Amino acid sequence: MHSYPYTITISSEKGGVGKTTLATNLAIYLKAMREDLPVTIFSFDNHFTIDKMFELQKRGENSKDVHSLLMAEKAAAVVETGQYGVNYIRSSTELGDIHEKFKGPMTLTRMLAESGISGIIIIDTRPDLNILTQNALYAADRVLIPVKDLPSLENCKNIFALFDQRGIDKKSLALIPCLIDERIKFEGIFKDQKTLLRAIAVNRGYRCLDSFISKSPKVESLNTNPDGKIYPILTHARGTDVHGQFMEISRDVLRSVDATEETRACLYSRWLQEKEANKKESYLARLEGLTERCLICGGVLAEQPDDRSFYFETSDRSSRGFLHGNCVSKMLCSTLYGLHDNDPAFDSARALVADKVTRGVSLLLPRINFDNCQLDYRQFNMSGELILQKNVAMPGFDAGIFNGVNDRLYLLLNEALAGFEGALRKESWLSVYPVDPGNPEAVLHEESYKMIHKLQKHFATTLKQTIL
Ligand SMILES: Nc1ncnc2c1ncn2[C@@H]1O[C@H](COP(=O)(O)OP(=O)(O)OP(=O)(O)O)[C@@H](O)[C@H]1O
Ligand SMILES: [Mg+2]
Ligand SMILES: [Zn+2]
């Protein structure tokens, strides 16, 4: 069964509030308290603290890192087993140029959902709200926001505002007082720093954890060592209050993990699947309405599927389907040049038309007046710009007389646009789109069909303006 991670993001716009210390040590405590639970950590910052703490082997030439993950590398290839049983992804200095790729706020959620990583993921972020941080915020089942003083508490409002803007439930967000100096006491009801911070936070409608993290010289010393290593609180600062505080925070986190039936990654993945299913359904519905024959030669397309090089659709969408490439080029050759099939110039003219017609959309609008039948023929490029317009007489069209030149055109118009009692549906037109004959149905897939839909709409507006 596919597994989905429970994601915890540590974030604050303010630098130096203890994000990285919280992220790395939380990973170690969680792993120590629940050995069978995989814990994976990575950082969007370029301080390499994660690497210094968890690395078992020096970085090699082929080592993958967070950059690789964000470039859609498979999670199995980027996650490494690290110290203390914690899995980690190496940090990268090259995340600056990746922002372009991360236009969408849910890209990371999707990556994590598809990663197959199980257990807990902890994401340490940079002290800003760039697109990567935003992605990490939206991917999280739980966001921990360390606050150490009033300015850092002030800064929280931007994270909350982000969630408001996107209409995302803010219940995943929680503040945690950090770097609390317990020697500082105040007179009155707010007797110390953490009580004051918590009171202000709650007053502003922010959820605040019951736990907090004290400032400890011992903890501060852990990242300055002769060997360049950074030591964990669990192994090197057991005697401090901070050790007990981390136990408490970890227990709290594990309770949430246990109580979560479906993580964000899981929910998002289900939503994506439903969306895909809907897409497939609309695709199948689009396939369903197609004409069975090529309306020009009358050939059954299932029997002659090879040359399906065009897709046509009428303005009212009531008739749609594929046409043979050969049939379309012959039809347009006769229509645009007035040539008979047996004219000596026919083949070379047809080759020319065939080339032109595959580069854009042909629009066929019959204009039927009492004694004058004309075809308004237009060609557009794929951006909807008009590149050619020609009025072609259609002698005998309304009387149903075939003259050997326009037969194919008359057949197509009649088959596609006929309404009651043989007359054409008023103001209806049809457009013919080139498609890949190797996979004509691809045109009905969500993205390409969207383009057709857009062009049809654009044509309708353009024609309305010229008809008026
Ligand atoms: N509980 C603590 N007691 C004392 N010092 C601490 C404590 N937690 C963190 N520090 C120290 O505070 C400094 C900042 O901590 P840390 O790097 O974790 O913050 P950060 O929010 O990740 O910073 P940045 O925004 O630069 O990434 C570090 O020197 C760290 O050793
Ligand atoms: Mg940091
Ligand atoms: Zn045909």
Image (cartoon, helix red, strand yellow):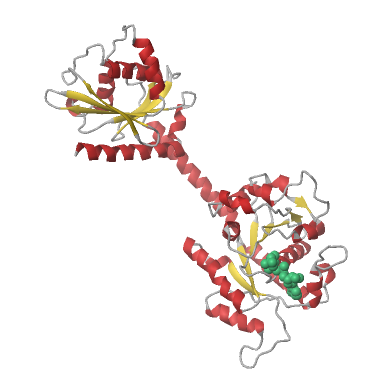
Q: Residue furthest right?
A: 226
- Most foreground residue, 215 or 110: 215
Task: Name the quarter where the C terminus is drawn.
Answer: top left
Relative vertical location of residue 358 with respect to residue 330 in this rendering, above or below: below
Q: Hey, which quadrant is residue 85 in on the image?
A: bottom right
Q: Residue at x 63, y 54 (%)?
A: 96
Residue 408 visible, this orientation = no
Relative vertical location of residue 453 with respect to residue 191 in this rendering, above or below: above
Q: Residue at x 57, y 71 (%)?
A: 156
Residue 99 visible, this orientation = yes
- Most foreground residue, 342 or 248: 342
Q: Hey, which quadrant is residue 378 in on the image?
A: top left
Q: Which residue lies furthest to the left in this view?
A: 370
Q: In this view, does 27 lie to the left or right of 187?
A: right
| Residue 358 picture location, percent across and down | 41, 25
Q: Which residue lies furthest to the bottom in this view?
A: 187
Q: Residue at x 55, y 74 (%)?
A: 206
